[in-house]
Image (spheres, grey):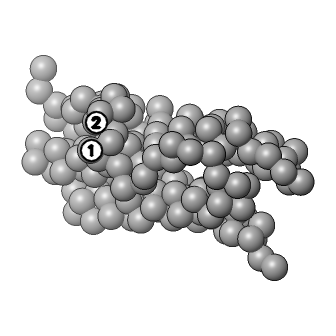
Amino acid sequence: MDIDIGISKKDRKNIADGLSKLLADTYTLYLKTHNFHWNVEGPMFNTLHLMFETQYNELALAVDAIAERIRALGHPAPGSYAAYAKLSSIKEETGTPKAEEMIRQLVDGQEAVARTARAVFPSAEKAGDEPTADLLTQRLQIHEKTAWMLRSLLSK
């Protein structure tokens, strides 16, 4: 059945493509955060273990919201590691860095997701896609705040 929600097919495709990159970045950051939750060590263990858990739980909910928006626009949501590897701007961590390096990588990841979300805005605004713009605004607020909180742990 054709989709007639007041956004052209071309605009829906452009927005869905941008959201697919956002989904890939968010999922990659989720996986990295969950990995660090499991493997963090050192004097800040309890603080970081709990903080990372809060963050990966929030990211898991975000992944679902982003994927569902892509589907509402009439496009399939990417859902494989291979697809995410092609779409994501965030590099995976295959080792087990020290706690401070984990924090640095998560700051970088949060900022990367914010940049990706911000890059989708022009397509959403051009198409009058308020639900996507709202989703992007929420994601930006969360990622910018989380980056700030993580960054504050690195202050000397």
Q: Residue at x 70, y 55 (%)?
A: 98
Q: Residue at x 60, y 56 (%)?
A: 106
State the image coordinates of residue 83 (x, y, percent, origin top left): 28, 36
Residue 119 in sight here:
yes
Identify the residue under disc 2.
Answer: 83
| Numbered label attached to residue 97 | none
Give left or right: position of 90 versus 3.
right
State the image coordinates of residue 110 (x, y, percent, origin top left): 54, 58
Cβ–Cβ below 8 Å for labels 1 and 2? yes
Q: Is residue 121 above or below residue 25?
A: below
Amino acid under disc 1: Lys
Give left or right: position of 71 versus 114.
left
Secondary structure, mark 1, is helix
Q: Residue at x 39, y 42 (%)?
A: 23
Quadrant, the C terminus: bottom right
Q: Residues within 10 Å of mark 1 (few under 14, many from 20)?
A: few
Mark 1 → mark 2, Cα distance in angstroms: 5 Å
| Numbered label attached to residue 86 | 1
Residue 137 in sight here:
no
Amino acid under disc 2: Ala
Secondary structure, mark 2, is helix
State the image coordinates of residue 152 (x, y, percent, origin top left): 75, 71
